[in-house]
Image: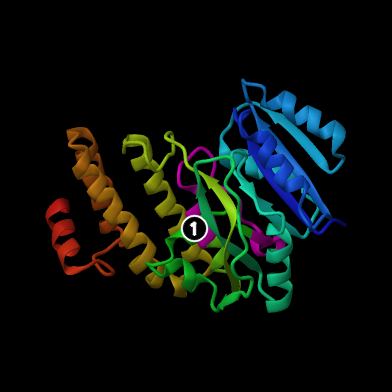
Amino acid sequence: MVKVAVIIPVYNVETYLPQCLDSVINQTLSDIEIICVNDGSTDNSGEILAQYAVKEKRIKVINQQNQGLSAARNAGLKIATANYISFIDSDDFVHPQFLEILYNAIQTSNSDIAGCNFAKISDDKEILKIENTSPKIYTPALNVLLDTKNFIHFNVWNKLYNRKAMQNISFVEGIYYEDWIFNICVFAQIKSFAWINSPLYGYRISNESIMRSSYNLKKLNDYVTGINEVYDFINKNYPEQWQKIKQTRIARTVKMMMNSALRSKDAEIVANTKKVLKKLYDCSVIGYSGLSLHNKIKLLNFLH
């Protein structure tokens, strides 16, 4: 059995796809399977994948109609055979030792997941450098996601997962912000997380980034879906963790929703945001705890 499955969702990235694939093919940890999910690309991405699959026998290609990032990742998970899983986005690239360093961090620390820092890439010629490979271990693992200073850790693409840590958990399909939902549910059921501070992952900056685009009703509904998914999973499986999550990640998400609605100056968005937050408050899914005094007052005024 191969050690690591690398799952790469692909959608209209012909410009960057070769660099991504080359960076994975040339990993120093060579005992891997590379699962590329062509999610209905309309450019030359499918042809590029077919060409690479002929030359590189470790590459498996799944072609499907466009269903979105989460569906592509789930499709890759269904056919992966390895005990460890990595998710890499097809417009990004990784350091040659990315997988080896994360895999060794898991083995030496007896952790379930390892993650690394990342570099924001705006130039194809930029090179990733190893700065430090000594892992910092977080126990319990969930604490690192609930520390308000560590929100970069919500990304799935800069991590290596023990497949056992993901049992009964998949990506919620058809929504934005799927990473934080997935990771909270996974991290809640593992003991420790190993963090490598070196930027071994190259994250390409895009003007079309979801986080840069404007707030709208779709994103509002996806925030609510995320809150409810986390609430349902944690209350069912780890109810003792809920207050901690509610006072950190959920409080932060509520603040983002409120501020985004107010900045939009769109009456419909503001009204709908008030409506859904009031409903979540009435059901005790959200509250005022975890917010600063300023934001408590702001939320109180917003809801009423």
Tally of marks? 1
Q: Position of residue 55 (x, y in %)?
A: 86, 34
Which residue sits at x=77%, y=34%? 61
Region rendered in magenta: 160-184
Please state if 277 lies on the left or on the right of 302 as rendered.
right
Residue type (three-letter) at the residue carrying disc 1:
Phe
Q: Residue at x 24, y 37 (%)?
A: 269
Q: Quadrant of the N terminus?
A: bottom right
Q: Residue at 58%, 62% (x, y): give it.
A: 116
- Relative vertical location of residue 149 with respect to residue 16 in this rendering, above or below: below
Q: Which residue is mark 1?
A: 154
Q: List x then y, in percent, for residue 5.
A: 75, 52
Q: Taking the image as drawn, is residue 225 in sight?
A: yes
Query: Above or below — where is 83 with respect to 65?
Result: below
Q: Is residue 161 magenta?
A: yes
Quadrant position of residue 13: top right
Q: Residues within 10 Å of mark 1 (few under 14, many from 20)?
A: many
Snapshot colouring: rainbow
Residue 157 can be seen, yes or no: no
Out of 112 and 136, give the one closest to the viewer: 136
In the rendered image, the vertical position of residue 275 relative to residue 131, given as above or below = above
| Residue 70 location, quadrant | top right
Residue 233 position within the rendered picture, expressed as x and y whole percent measured from the top left: 51, 60
Q: Residue furthest front?
A: 125
Q: Is residue 274 magenta?
A: no
Looking at the picture, how far across and down is residue 34, in whole percent?
77, 45
| Observer-nearest of 100 and 126 | 126
Closest to the observer, 205 or 300: 205
Which element type, helix, strand or loop, lies under badge 1?
A: helix
Q: In the image shown, does 213 or 231 lie closer to the viewer?
A: 213
